[in-house]
Image (spheres, rainbow, N blue to C red):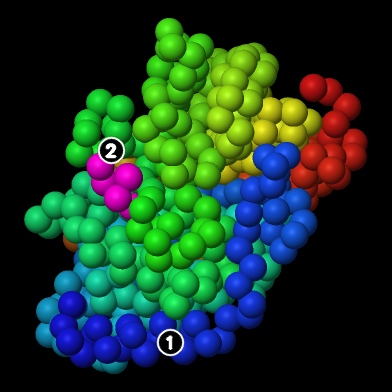
Amino acid sequence: MTKSTVLCVAALLITHASAYAADSKPYIGEDLQLRVNGKPFFIRGMAYAPEPLGFPGNAMQTKSQYGWNYSQGAWLCGPANQYAPNDWQSPCADDDLVGTLILGTSANSAYNTAIQDKWKRDLDTMKKMGVNTLRLYNVNPAGKNHLPFLDAVAERGMYVIYPALSNYLARETPGGFKKELVQAIVSETCPGKVQHPAILAYTAGNEVTPIQDQEDASRIQQTMEIVKATCPGALVTYAHNDNPPDWVMANNQNGESPLMEKFPLMDFLTVNIYRKNPSNGDIDAYHKLFYSDIKGVTEKYRKPFLIGETGEHQNDRFKPFWFNHEWQYVVANSTPVGNLGAVFFSYNDEPIKKSRSGTSNDVYMGIVSADLAPLDKKDQAIDPPDRFKAADYQGIPDYTDGGYLIQHAGSKKGAGRYEMFVNDGKGIAGCSFVGAPSPAGIGACAAAK
């Protein structure tokens, strides 16, 4: 960072720290329940990585095939001034779309206005769906300010599981892991050791290989130490992929969980779970998951668990409203095993973050698409509406952008996903984030277990 950028960031932190209310951090009680403001809090989570509107202009061209500029969408990934007034790099390059650009240039001002409008629309939609927690994956403290996003979350009474060690910093930062960037992330969100009111917990990495790779383990450990020193009392977790030998005690002869043993500073363990029946989405394996795998860890270590991701790539092979059935089980069985809730993956499709050709299944895991049509209508492409994946969703049409033929043949596989969160009685009545918000208020959703 330049000296002027550092001074700007310092001023922002001082201002925000003085504006925060009394420091009442979320905490975990002896009963392994998460509490926020002293009350039990069950995580109704959504993985969120804002996708610029204007897709499928995701070849990051600055003009459409019709000759006019994108005013949103792919245009957001055009050149701006993140690091210096004349650097002209894409603010999307670091995979961080929850930060406003700090330098006061006209290009940055236009970007900041557009990306904040995008957040507000998304946050309002998720709030109505009953989401109370967002899980983020990538932030970059260099040249970006994340407090406006966190303020917008807090204004809506929502919370964030925030990446202290993001995917970008863990593996992709030029020159390797930089401890000072992790420090900057935590300091920005906990200035003067006062935690931002939107922060629920910090994650110290996602799906790396700390059991097999000592360098990964060291980065996670250093990140947890930074969180605890910089923001005393803040909760910190690490999110692992569901490789049972790494975290389940039953797979280890000494009766220990390798991940829990390796990271004693961890307040709760997060695992990304995709154990549904691949043919129909049934949760046949969930009884063992909850009452053997999860309960074994939480009882031995007296620390809770979080399903950090759950979702499905294909969706069309599953029975309708499969997530309502899964959520039904989660809310009815979490308290006995010390599970804090679940995070659905994900809110929106991620065409820019994934491959241009759309060959990665991960592109289509959202409940909302950044699709738009018709692309020859400038007014609709400038500020297109979100395309919610209701049952009649037909996928993303082929499109030519800058000479590239962009095809997304698999995009229709998300059809019907949105309706699982705005359930109108077609599936299990009330078995959604709104209808069954917590184990204490399951209602009609609790009938079957």
- The spot of residue 261 in percent (x, y) is 41, 29
Residue 4, percent from left and from top: 21, 90
Between 193 and 20, the one lying in front of the other is 193
Q: Image check: 18 left or right of 113? A: right
Residue at x 26% of width, y 53% of height: 168
Residue at far top of view: 253
Give the mark nearest the N terminus, 1 or 2. Answer: 1
- Give the residues in magenta: 218-223
How packed mark 2 is, by other alpha carbons closer than 10 Å (few <14, some 14-19, many 20 or more), is some
Toward which corner of the image does residue 140 lie, by quadrant?
Answer: bottom left
Confirm whether the magenta stretch covers residue 130: no
Residue behind mark 1: 14
Residue 218 falls in which quadrant of the image?
Answer: top left
Residue at 84% of width from left, 35% of height from top?
A: 445
**Amino acid, disc 2:** Ala
Residue 437: image x %, image y %?
77, 47
Identify the element where label 2 is drawn: helix
Visible residue check, residue 58? no
- Between residues 176 and 89, which one lies in front from this camera angle? 176
For the residue pair 147 and 317, the one nearer the viewer reads as 147
271 sits left or right of 157 in the view: left
Instruction: Give the residue drawn at x 46%, y 89%.
Output: 15
Q: CA distance from mark 1 to mark 2?
A: 33 Å
Dominant SS of magenta comes to helix
Q: Is residue 16 above or below residue 294?
A: below
| Horizontal and vertical percent position of residue 141 | 30, 70
Task: Please report contact status of discs 1 and 2: CB closer than 8 Å, yes or no.
Answer: no
Q: Vertical placement of 47 versus 257: above or below?
A: below
Residue indicated by mark 2? 217
Quick one: quadrant of the N terminus? bottom left
The kind of residue on which mark 1 rests is: Ile
Q: Quadrant of residue 375?
A: bottom left
